[in-house]
Amino acid sequence: MYNPFKPGKEEGGPSTASGERYDPSVWAAAIKTSLRQKFGGVQFGAKPKFALVEAVGKKVIVKINDVGPLRPGRIIDLNERTMRHFDPSLQLGVISDVRVMPLSGDSWIPGPVG
């Protein structure tokens, strides 16, 4: 899980790579910088892309609206709402065995699947 808020700068949230404000209450994630092209070239000012994230027997469609920084060995950082879908108590902080598949098009509705 990631939270880009800096102390004293929480009002409105910082901008993401897409130019949107970071919002911990939406279904969103940041993708590893080296995977940007695979996910449609996430870049500043560009329309967010979408991905299907699968872990712990659950699936969710997320809006990929940001890029790293990410810690080594991780492929995606989930915002708070998305992480709570997989880990309601937020005790894990990191989930292993995560599958992330890019989705083509821009008509996806973020949220749980099935």
Image (spheres, rainbow, N blue to C red):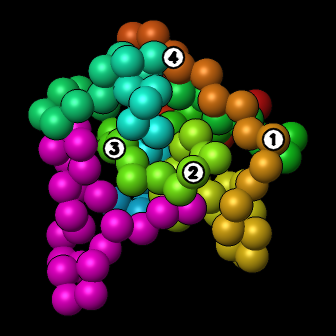
Image quadrant assignment for residue 75 = top right
Q: Earlier along the polypeptide chain: callout 2 or callout 3? A: 3
Q: Nearer the viewer, mark 2 or mark 1?
A: 2
Q: Distance between the residues labelled 2 and 3?
A: 17 Å
Q: Distance between the residues labelled 4 and 3?
A: 16 Å
Image quadrant assignment for residue 47 = top left
Residue 7 painted magenta: yes
Res. 29 in view: yes
Mark linked to residue 97: 1
Q: Distance between the residues labelled 3 and 1?
A: 21 Å
- Asked if marks 2 and 1 touch (Cβ < 8 Å), the reply is no
Label 4, residues with CA under 10 Å away: few <14, some 14-19, many ≥20: some
Secondary structure type for disc 1: loop
Q: Nearer the viewer, mark 2 or mark 3?
A: 2
Residue 20, image x, y percentages: 20, 47
Image quadrant assignment for residue 92 = bottom right
Res. 81 in view: no
Hey, what amino acid is under mark 1?
Asp
Hey, what amino acid is under mark 4?
Leu
Q: Earlier along the polypeptide chain: callout 4 or callout 1? A: 1
Q: Name the residue under label 2.
A: 72
Secondary structure type for disc 4: strand
The span shown in magenta is 1-22
Q: Mark 4 points at which residue?
A: 103
Q: How far apart are marks 2 and 1 (CA)?
A: 15 Å
Q: Which residue is drawn at 46% across and 27% down?
A: 35
Residue 77, image x, y percentages: 52, 51
